[in-house]
Amino acid sequence: MKILGIETSCDETAASVVENGTKVLSNVIASSVDMHAQTGGVVPEVAAREHIRQISPVVDKALSDAKLNWSDIDAIAVTHAPGLIASLLVGVNTAQTLAYIHKIPLIPIHHVAGHIYANFLERQISNFKFPILILTISGGHNELVLMKGHHDFEVIGETLDDAAGEAFDKIARLLGLGFPGGPIISERAEDGDPIAFDFPRPMLDKDNKYNFSFSGLKSAVKREVDKISENKPTEGGIHESRLRDGVINDISASFQSAVIDVLADKLVMAADEFKVKSVHLAGGVSANQLLRKTVRERLSDNVQLFWPEKMVYCTDNAAMIASAAYFLPKKKINEKSVEVSSQLPL
Ligand code: KG4
Ligand code: ZN
């Protein structure tokens, strides 16, 4: 079965054809991230306009890269929530129209379910044993999910404020390092000292043991930056070039280490409590090499650990949406409900 996936929930216009949920026949991504880099974050109107410009060529390329015609496509899967409303609308309207024209089913998919299925791409999934514990960490999401079967999710923890990726983006902005922050901070951290600054590791009380909160950490970094800045911050709190490179590297390393400690400790604690044999990392922050290494070191040896097979499957893509659709049980497909929503629980 060949499913065409479409993903437009944030700043990536993506289309992909996936066979039987795992075999990626094409994976096309047009990103407007360079435009948002100039403003230090995603501007929803700019993202939506770019989706409108890109969506048709991206879908055409997904088909031609896969060397397929419309008659070969069995269904269209599209992200309908959560995300930026205008951006989601472009993908959903396109998918609805194409499904109608080509008389094929339309399958609405939750974006975070998509990230979870990114780990099924190009994998021998007979190796996977439910329940799987998944840490979904991206710019907009930060959840601990217990997956008991296909599309059978229990969210056991979530962020009370910022998501991990969002925290990376905000600290990068504070340091004047550009957008998106995760890759830049982790690169700067390589030349920094992770114990130069003793930033807090917010583990929260026992009622919140699997929830996350990064706003206190963000404030602690800001206080430190204000203290050591040679001048007062510019409007918007940006300290650009006022901190020495070495200090920026040390702050990056110390901040990254605090975030990873919290993510890894909570993940390992939950893996023990729920006695899972498989742990997956998913979403943009799962690209982080130190996080992967730290989780592997702290998890017991008899627990399998997976992160997406390729870097492009960590961040937003449409292959993960097509995969999620393939594994969605028929009784859960609701073609009538393709309404877009900025916030929808998993
Ligand atoms: O999954 P994604 O593409 O989009 C959302 O669904 O939000 O994730 C993007 C996020 C950004 O916040 C970015 O800073 C973060 O993933 N990210 C990283 C790394 N690469 C991307 N964070 C930490 N380390 C990285 N290497
Ligand atoms: Zn995402």
Image (cartoon, rainbow, N blue to C red):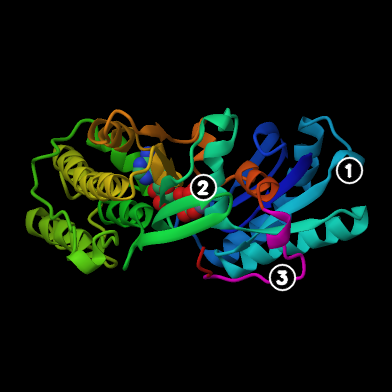
Give the amino acid type for the residue marked by disc 3 in the picture.
Answer: Ser
Cβ of mark 2 under 8 Å from ligand 2: the answer is no
Q: Is residue 118 above or below residue 6?
A: above
User: Looking at the image, which residue is at 72% across and 60% down?
Assistant: 331
Task: Tell us which disc is closer to us: 1 or 2.
Answer: 2
Chain-order first, disc 2 or disc 3? 2
Give the amino acid type for the residue marked by disc 1 in the picture.
Answer: Trp
Q: Which residue is mark 1?
A: 70
For the stretch drawn in magenta, the main secondary structure is: loop
Q: Nearer the viewer, residue 168 or 99?
A: 99
Q: Are marks 2 and 3 in contact (CB under 8 Å)?
A: no
Magenta segment boundaries in residue numbering: 329-343
Residue 212 included in the magenta stretch of the image: no
User: Looking at the image, which residue is at 51% across and 35% down?
Assistant: 128
Chain-order first, disc 1 or disc 2? 1
Q: CA distance from mark 2 to mark 3?
A: 21 Å
Chain-order first, disc 3 or disc 1? 1
Question: Circle 2 — which element?
Answer: helix
User: Looking at the image, which residue is at 33% across and 54% down?
Assistant: 164
Quadrant in the rendering for residue 109: bottom right
Q: Which residue is mark 2?
A: 116
- Residue 331 is left or right of residue 224, and the answer is right
Badge 1 local density, few (<14 within 10 Å), some, or many (20+)?
Answer: few
Question: Circle 1 — which element?
Answer: helix
- Residue 162 is left or right of residue 55, and the answer is left
Task: Tell us which disc is closer to us: 3 or 1.
Answer: 3
Q: Which residue is mark 3?
A: 337
Q: Is residue 204 above or below residue 278?
A: below
- Residue 120 is left or right of residue 184, and the answer is right
Q: Is residue 41 visible?
A: no
Cβ of mark 1 under 8 Å from ligand 2: the answer is no
User: Looking at the image, which residue is at 60% across and 69% down?
Assistant: 85
